[in-house]
Image (cartoon, rainbow, N blue to C red):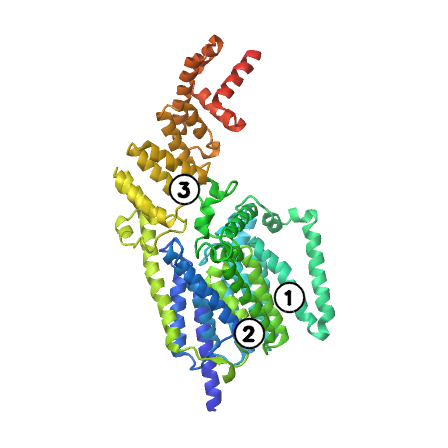
Amino acid sequence: MKVEKEILQKSSRLIAFASVVFAGFFYLYYPHIQNYSTTPKWIFGSIIGLAMLFLGRKEKFVWSWGLTAWFGFVLLYFIQSFWSYNVWDSIMRALPFILAPLLVLLLRRESNDLIDFYTKVATIVSLLILPLVLVNLFELAGLYFSDEYSHQSTYSFRYTFGNRNQYSELLTLTLPIIAVGFFSSVQKWKKVLFALSIGLIYILVSLLLNRAVFLVLYGVYPLILALYFLQKSKAKKLGVGLLSGIYIAGLAVFFSPLRNKIPFLKNLLETNYGSGNERIRIWGNSLELWQESLFLGHGSGDWKIEILRTPLQFTQAEGGTVFFQRAHNDFLQIAVENGFLGLLLFLVFFVLSFFLLFKSTINNGSKVLLFGGVLAYIVISNFSFPIEKIELLFFLFLFILPGFSSQLSRTKKFNLPKIGMAVLILSTLILSVKWLSYEKDYFEYKKDNDRIAFKDIDKNKYTIDATSTPLFWHEGNYLFNKQDYIGALIAYHQALKFNPYHVHVINNIGSSHYALGEIDQAEEYFKKALKLNPVFVETLMNYASLQFNRGNIDGALVNILTIPEKNEPKNYMTFILAIAKAKYKEMEDKYDDPEFEKFLSSTVENDAFLYEISKRARRSNASYEMELRAKVSKDTVQ
């Protein structure tokens, strides 16, 4: 009786802890910061981690060589954070690396039986995620029947996650756990629950149009399911038939005209919305950055800084209004930031995890399904950035959990001191709370221009925002607008320490020198900005103004005619008319050509004509004068 009561207590504790963990990861929302999906979950995870540490079972922690490789990578990441441009930003981004595996270790401690553990976790995940999935399907049906369903419209389906892609990735990574529960459970109601969850998640994630998870859903998981059946001697034919049928049907649809008639396939293949072409370009740039510092990398968290000095033509970053924060490939990003050494440790972690998973004593079917989860994570890692999302990283460690140990035998326990674990989790909690306060103050400043909130931020710790913009840049703008140009220069140079390739910062340093009458220094910084981004509108306008005031009309025209028509600022017309009229005067003085002079005098006050010539010059890449002469020739012939 006493043993049964103790087992019941352990089971209830596991259910309670797991329910709270997954409820927080799925539904925790804090709208008072810009990145509402990250820091609050760190805080929540730290609190529940401390609760499990002190209120859970009094067992030693299970360890493995795989975890040793992981924490070797984490240690290297932290060390390399100290030569980052933004030390605290880099350290904070690494908090999920510590917290996710520790939470899995603590949760695992509550159960001796891994299959029972996975069945309970699968039940909790299904019950928690189903309501959200059903609501989403209802909303997607509304989009579909109102003809508003598209790749772009589905992007709003993000809820408590950073974006639609991370949400669909989470749903995808729940499937192996639910599948283990389905094949392991003997209770009929649970099998129905798991089957319903898998089916609805498959439909929803397919409709959310994430290409990476599409590869997982229709590439990795069918293969894993076939392997699952193949290792069951009585079901080999079913496994082979299932795999063949899925792939043949998929290929038939994909390469047939039907793909243009099925809305989700048509939208999935759409490439105009922030997609594959950009990623290929930044991957190529990332490889070049890696080659510059092959062994040790550029420093943790510095990919987003270094990428700004590489060519970003034909991407959203070209206009200087979008700044890529991630390579959308964890392996490449680690290679750039932590070099070959960091990438090697990361890869060793996966190799050891695979080895230990298949060496574990959990049944072969569950091994195959969990192996599929790790493969899914790796595929997603090649197109996204799950490593920094604590809820996605948490699932990775759930997949490799059997490799820690399948039983809590004394010979396989590692006595990680409770005080050491408490210090790690408590440190994460304290850092996260402080970081959240900075994020909240910054959000208030951005939302309402709250200068008091902005002053409360330690800008030497919370140095850079989610667009790679240093906070001192905002301080510089405030001083510049008050015409305190020397103070603005000081602030802009402080900003430059945290992002030396931020085109806005460099441009504004040039503007401050220009306002102080320091023309040579202004020109130096305008040139630096245009070297980084040759089509950055603000600098092109500023440099055109500088050249115009120096009397270099052709130089002014070169700059202002580089601005694409779609990116013209509001004051473009004023600038181009002034420069064009100066060019007219220059040509009148330079040439002794009565016919051409007559043409100039008849059009010099025609603002629409002067602007039209500027458009022609930009489209043809010819000079303003050449387009004028082409117009004279054309009118003469007519």
Query: Which secondary structure, mark 2?
Result: helix
| Amino acid type for the residue under numbered disc 1 | Ile
Q: Which mark is residue 503?
A: 3
Q: Residues within 10 Å of mark 2 (few under 14, many from 20)?
A: many
**Alpha carbon of mark 2 to alpha carbon of mark 1: how far?**
19 Å
Q: Which residue is mark 1?
A: 224
Query: Which secondary structure, mark 1?
Result: helix
| Amino acid type for the residue under numbered disc 3 | Val
- Label 1 near label 2: C-beta < 8 Å? no
Q: Which of 117/584 is in front?
A: 584
Q: Which mark is residue 403?
A: 2
Q: Which of 148/26 is in front?
A: 26
Quadrant for the C terminus, please.
top right
Whichever of labels 1 and 3 marks the residue nearer the N terminus, that label is 1
Residue 380 horizontal/vertical position (percent) = 55, 58
Residue 468 horizontal/vertical position (percent) = 40, 49
Name the residue rendered at 41%, 75% in the picture: 52
